Image (cartoon, rainbow, N blue to C red):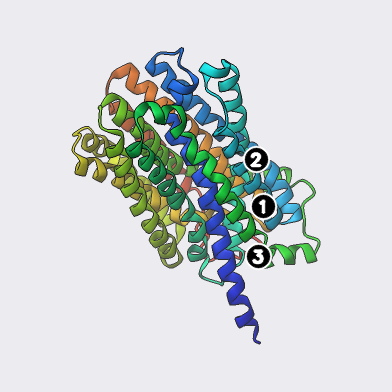
Amino acid sequence: MSSTNTEAPSRRRIATASFIGTAIEFYDFYIYGTAAALVFGTVFFPQFSALAGTLASFATFAVGFVARPLGSVLFGHFGDRLGRKRMLIVSLLLMGGATVAIGLIPSYQDIGVAAPILLVITRFLQGIGLGGEWGGAVLLATEYAPPGKRGLYSAFPQLGPAIGFVLGNALFLLLNATMSAETFRAIGWRIPFLASAILLAVGYYIRMRIAETPIFQAALDKQERSRVPFLDLLRRQPGVLALATLSFILAHTLFYTVTTFVLSYGTGTLKISRTMMLVAAMIAVSVMGLLTLVFAVYSDRIGRKRLCVASAVLAALWAFPMFWLIETRDPLLITLGMTGGLLCFAMLYGPMGAFLPELFRVRFRYSGASFAYSAAGVVGGGVSPIIATDLLARTGSSTPISLYLIGIAVICVVSLLLLRETKDADFTDGLAP
């Protein structure tokens, strides 16, 4: 059998493993965001006002993002020393176990202040797990990719967030349609968290069957490992790490503004039905998933940087129209507004699956890609919903939120312009700017 024939099945397994793993991990992470927007304020912070409860639940949501850089350093260290496969299995088990545990935490009414404390601890563990997931999954895909197809291969793990989000929200939508508000608040919200145990078993089985990436294996064979990858990264490529992190903040900001803050804004302030908002979000994310694949593949032709800059400019232009459309309370216009926001996200997120790994050298690539992604999430995903909620409470208007999005988009453009195109870089060494 030729080498070509033996490699093809392996690459198919790699595509499946990277996709399934991120879909499961992001399902776990996103159902928390949905539950935080819909019920956590009353379940875990009933002593607060409605606004304070929402802010408190979003604060626990942010804890996961704060933990992600720590997880990226931890998993990046061992991923760059021991291999991608082992760390992807550990991250999956940690994330899945923490998610199931959240579904078992009693309410504040049952155990008092211990309930929100346990919620914060399990959310922190979720963040640690996801901090090692994304970087490992995109490395698994891109380090197996044939020349000229890293964008295509990076798209497989990049589809995970869309599938995970749709799966989680479909379950919430079903529960919302079949349960009373009181039943949903009491036990219904727990079901998506407990169901993660099934997905965890599937993901574990698939990831156990993958092999180490050939690029990392070649580095092992040549004894090209860093003793402390993250410190080596800070010494060798500090500027690239800073710019990569700043360039990715917009992606997190767009996604979590549309899927978390807007869900809370629509159901709470605008008094739009929960079902309507969940359906609109699912449609928008489904379109986003398809476009993520399209833009990732297209980046193999025209380059990563050009598409990413275009997405940031488009996001700045859409910042005001998005909220104008949502505030009409018209179902079609709400869906259009959310879809436009996630189109901008897909144009940035699709190419980034290949762009971030290409920026860093092999011996600390896991650390670099994971940390840039996770650190950007602290601001974009963890802090942005809190800032948006606070701005809305202070002004009663979405205008400051739109201006905030524009500011993040400007930071993204400037950072990208200072980075070099990497589409044709030597991926075996990571010749970055």
**Nearer to us: label 2 or label 1:** 1
Q: Position of residue 235 (x, y in %)?
A: 70, 44
Q: For the view shown, which residue lies furthest in the bottom direction?
A: 1
Q: Is residue 383 visible?
A: yes
Which residue appears at 56% of the width and 70% of the height? Answer: 12
Q: Is residue 354 visible?
A: no
Describe the element under mark 2 as helix, strand or loop. Answer: helix
Q: Are marks 3 and 1 in contact (CB under 8 Å)?
A: no
Q: Is residue 259 left or right of 103 when viewed as pictured? A: left
Of residues 403 and 169, which is closer to you in this image?
A: 169
Above or below, 352 relative to 41 = below
Q: Are marks 2 and 1 in contact (CB under 8 Å)?
A: no
Of residues 153 and 314, which is closer to you in this image?
A: 153
Q: Position of residue 144 (x, y in %)?
A: 61, 67
Q: Position of residue 134 (x, y in %)?
A: 57, 49
Can you identify the residue that label 1 sits on? 89
Of label 2 and label 3, which has the lower sequence position? Answer: 2
Can you identify the residue that label 3 sits on? 428
**Nearer to us: label 3 or label 1:** 1
Which residue appears at 38% of the width and 17% of the height? Answer: 50
Q: Amino acid at mark 2?
A: Gly
Above or below, 84 relative to 169 = below
Q: Quadrant of residue 139?
A: bottom right
Of label 3 and label 1, which has the lower sequence position? Answer: 1
Q: Amino acid at mark 3?
A: Thr
